[in-house]
Amino acid sequence: MDKPRVAFFDFASCEGDQLQIVNLEEDLLKVVGAVDVVSFREAMKGHSDNYDIAFVEGSITRRSDEPRLLEIRKNAKILVAIGACATIGGVNLLKNFQDLESVRKFVYGDKFFQYETYPARPIKAVVPVDLEIHQCPINRDEFVMAFKALLMGKKPEFPNYPVCEDCKKAENICVFEMGMTCMGPVTRAGCGACCVVEGSVCWGCRGFIDHPNADSEREVLAKYGLSVGDILKKFRLYTGFSEVSK
Ligand code: SF4
Ligand code: SF4
Ligand code: SF4
């Protein structure tokens, strides 16, 4: 039986998710042994348009990205968005809240007119996506779990409860008690609340859980003198698409 053919693609990204995959080392070899990798710019030369599973990193930031993505969608039986830029727009969405011409001038100086741009968006805003692997960057173990499930024809299961649950298990003091704010109550768990464990707050890079308890979140925010609008604005780094797509 032919092995499934797999390809990796990137749009506007830092390639950190593909790097996570390359860094899998032994685990990568085990997974790669079960498939034919036909395109992976970060790890090999050569390319084929004949693939079954496409992993796509990065967000769509130019109209000219769209035909390429539509072609990938047409070729792939399964399209998987990997990393926050691909799943929720990620850091690229920050420019959507600025004047785009000023952004182009800031980045490209007097050559700005040679570089097109448009409001950044996640992959699912342009083509249907079969699966999303969250986080910035993706978690290697979660990637391997999801990849293996796909190869077995199963849908991978991801946590669908808030980061706060992991955070409480890790016995952190809630940052709200220390006068800070946090996206943990509405963000998909699975990272072990690592940012809070390391002394920061949850910025929401794993995206919203499917059914966030909005009333409870409003109550918590009100207790600390905040509104939903305040917190979404503060955490635009990862929540920007939820604002523009309302
Ligand atoms: S999600 Fe994070 S690691 Fe992945 S491309 Fe975006 S910024 Fe880089
Ligand atoms: S610090 Fe953040 S993730 Fe942890 S319990 Fe508080 S709100 Fe939830
Ligand atoms: S704690 Fe929040 S920001 Fe940090 S990795 Fe987890 S989901 Fe992302």
Image: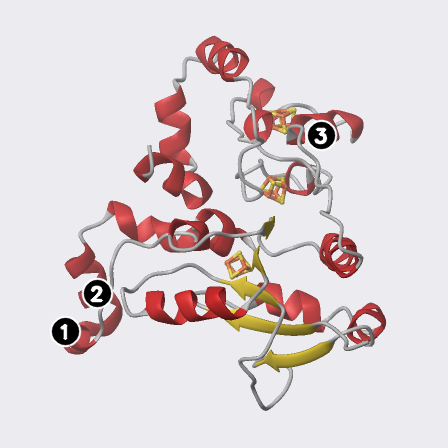
Look at mark 1 in the image and give the residue it sits on: 113
Q: Is the Cβ of the residue at disc 2 closer than 8 Å to that at disc 3?
A: no
Q: Which secondary structure, mark 2?
A: helix
On-image quarter of the C terminus: top left
Q: Which secondary structure, mark 1?
A: helix
Disc 1/disc 3 C-alpha distance (Å): 46 Å
Specify few, some or many for label 3: CA neighbours under 10 Å numbering under 14, 14-19, or 20 or more.
many
Q: Is the Cβ of the residue at disc 2 closer than 8 Å to that at disc 1?
A: yes
Where is ligand 2, by quadrant?
top right
Q: Position of residue 41 (x, y in %)?
A: 56, 81
117, above or below 168, in the image: below
Relative depth, front residue between 243 and 165: 243
17, above or below 39, in the image: above
Specify few, some or many for label 2: CA neighbours under 10 Å numbering under 14, 14-19, or 20 or more.
some
Q: Position of residue 64 (x, y in %)?
A: 29, 70
If you read the primary sequence from the N terminus, does the residue marked by circle 2 or circle 3 appear first? 2
What numbered label is drawn on residue 167? 3
Specify few, some or many for label 1: CA neighbours under 10 Å numbering under 14, 14-19, or 20 or more.
few
The reply to whether the residue tagged 3 has its Cβ within 8 angstroms of ligand 2 is yes
What's the amino acid at mark 2? Answer: Arg
Instruction: State which quadrant residue 222 falls in.
Output: top left
Disc 2/disc 1 C-alpha distance (Å): 8 Å
Look at mark 2 in the image and give the residue it sits on: 104
2, above or below 169, in the image: below
Instruction: State which quadrant residue 5 falls in.
Output: bottom right
On-image quarter of the N terminus: bottom right
Q: Position of residue 70 (x, y in %)?
A: 40, 65
206, above or below 173, in the image: below
Residue at image position (49%, 9%) is 219
Position of residue 168 in the picture relative to residue 129 (left or right): right
Q: Nearer the viewer, mark 1 or mark 3?
A: 1
